[in-house]
Image: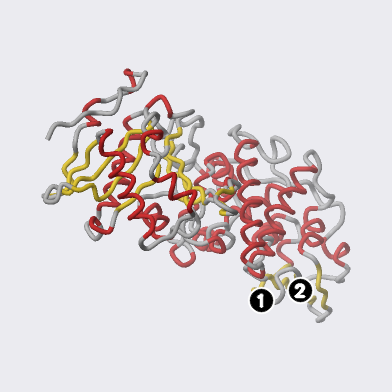
Amino acid sequence: MSITLNPTPSNPTSLHPEELRPVPLDADHVLRLAQPHEYEEFGNMLEDAFTHGCWVTEEYRRGLHAISARAETNYIWAVEQRSSGRIVAGVLTPHPEAIARGTSTFNILGVARAGRGRGIGHKLVEHAIDQARTNGAETISINSSPHMVHAHNLYYQHGFHRRIERETKVVDHGQRLYSFELRLAPPTSRFTSRRADTMPALSLTDPQASPDSVLSLGPSPITVALNPTDPDHLSIKILLRLTTAGEEFAVVDTKKDPARIHLTRADRTEADLAPKDVLDALAGAPTGGAPYTEASIRQDLIEAGRRLPRAANEEKEALARLIYARLGVLDYELRDPDAYVAGTEPTLVDIQLFSVLALFDQGIRREFGWGAASVRDYPYVWRYARKLAQRHGLLTQSEKQWIGLDGAGADGTNAAWDIPYRILEPLDREP
């Protein structure tokens, strides 16, 4: 059988002809470029794939047959079943010149009923990834309808994660598309690694008043009851150690309302306070220098994270977009390796942000389901968190193990501390 390739893109330097040759998948299936006279059959195959085990709107169904128009900017990859001569699966990958700013994609991957049960879907995803990598892409970004859960699981298995903050596109009578991303080739790292024991100790502004007087609890010692699910949980623990009164406090876990902190003095005098009041008391005067950013971190990350467990599905989706959008902005603002939120030295707001990041995978991220983006998917935020984590005295050894920084972490979760795709070397590597 002769094979006619799609028209050659206008950018021949990006084209690798060997990557456009047929690829045997198994003894009875071959992946090849579809010929123009096969586009109608290809569209019929897609309709069979998308209407059995799934459902689509009429508008989407018509788009599955618009193969000639899609071929102007995409390669039409078809899986031919040799024994029958039929097209049983396929995927569209973009021409090299359509890859913008290092980001590639692929479209309408489908496997008809006649081709299912042979792992062809996995092989098509692998092929699309190979095509993107060959053409120099650093990232693959795709959209998918919310109900296509089988496709989502396929993407997760190949390393894609959701970018919830990008899910603003609404199509087909109200469907908000899911956004997935896979990062491929990292650029050269911009920072120099340093060992943890060479980093300076963390220093905060001296409190203007002791925690006792601010909290109106009388003389120490004081027992602080913290809910470990609260976003401020780790912040308060850290500040209790860093302030001069740290040795006079004991911290215990409680399952009480995470929006309140319970304090008990030695003479059993008690008080329930808001976490922010305790943080301000421990750190002294409110931090300055970046009031908007500080308020955004508290409202968009801490308070939103506190609302998540009780949120209904619609509110949870809105909170997810808010939280991930804030992380995206912070990733841009912290691109300078020496940057902190409010300047060149850490303040209370850095401790609060670090606490959210340290427990993000084990707390907030779990509310969004498998495949949601992790801290490591925001490389400059990741670097910032690692930089703080290595400051002497910030975390105890048990806390490092708990959050996954040293060992497996709680419930085996340590993805937040894996090296990001775009940063090649960890901060604590030997110089």
Identify the mark nearer the N-term, 2 or 1.
1
SS class, disc 1? loop
Q: Is residue 400 visible?
A: yes
Give the residue displayed 37% in from the left and 38% down from the top: 67
Indicate the amino acid at tag 2: His
Q: Position of residue 28 (x, y in %)?
A: 13, 50
Residue 1 in the image: x percent, y percent?
Answer: 12, 35
Amino acid carrying mark 1 in the image: Thr
Estimate the spatial distance between the alpha carbons at disc 2 and disc 1, rounded to whole Å. 9 Å
What label sits on residue 371 in the rendered view? none
SS at mark 2? strand
Task: Judge left or right: residue 334 versus residue 411.
Answer: right
Q: What residue sits right under mark 1 in the picture?
A: 254
Residue drawn at (65%, 56%) of the image: 318
Q: Residue at x 74, y 54 (%)?
A: 299
Name the residue: 49% across, 32% down. 192
Q: Is residue 427 left or right of residue 67?
A: right
Q: Which residue is mark 2?
A: 262
User: Residue 391, can we see it?
Assistant: no
Apparent side of residue 176 relative to residue 305 in the rendered image (left or right): left
- Residue 78 or residue 241, whichever sits in front: 78
Verify CB contact (< 8 Å) between mark 2 and mark 1: yes
Outermost bottom residue: 268
Quadrant for residue 270, please give it.
bottom right
Vertical side of 134 occupied by 82: above or below: below
Pointer 2 local density, CA inside 10 Å: few below 14, some 14–19, many at least 20: many
